[in-house]
Image (cartoon, rainbow, N blue to C red):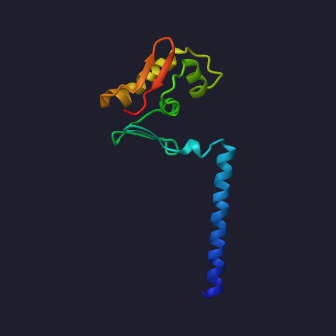
Amino acid sequence: MTEIELRTSVRQLEDARAEAEGTAITLRELQGISDAALVNLEIGDLELDPARKHVTRAGQVVDLTAREFALLEYLMRQRGNVVTKQQIMANVWNFDFEGDSNIVEVYVGRLRRKIDKPFGREDIETLRGTGYRMRLER
């Protein structure tokens, strides 16, 4: 391969990579995924990777269903703030959900059994008559 052919090949590869990166950004924008939504969330030793749908606590992988993951992500993004059942329903379930709002209590209980109790933590707080709050780092 001559030097000119090599430079042409390198240029073509660079152009293809730039086009692929532009396409990936465009797809993320079309899907409504911002760069902020892809940033890893951490509260103490609890880590959530939204891009890979991966959660760890104290270095141990925590297996969550898609809905449990969405609930945990929402609570972590709102950490320190009180969120009502209605806010959770609107952000984790869709507005058309016509089921019982007790589903939120059920899923919060599931999350506690997976991310809190096995690790001796109580990071998801219930504020009676108000809602839920994810504690800030200790």
The residue sitting at the bottom extreme is 2
In the depicted structure, whether residue 64 falls above or below residue 10? above
Residue placed at 54% from the left, 18% from the top? 85
Residue at figure coordinates x 55%, y 15% from the top left: 101
Lateral position of residue 77 relative to residue 23, left or right? left
Which residue is drawn at the image coordinates 52% and 45% (left, top)? 39
Q: Quadrant of the C terminus?
A: top left
Q: Quadrant of residue 11?
A: bottom right
Total marks drawn?
Answer: 0
The vertical placement of 64 against 40, above or below, is: above
Displayed quadrant of residue 117: top left
118 to 16, vertically: above or below: above
Q: Position of residue 61 (x, y in %)?
A: 37, 40
Q: Nearer the viewer, residue 10 or 80?
A: 80
In the rendered image, residue 50, in percent from the top left (x then y), is placed at: 51, 41
Quadrant for the N terminus in the image: bottom right
Residue 104 on image: x %, y % = 50, 20
Residue 103: image x %, image y %?
51, 18
Instruction: Name the side, left or right, on which 16 lies relative to 45.
Output: right
Q: Nearer the viewer, residue 59 or 132?
A: 132
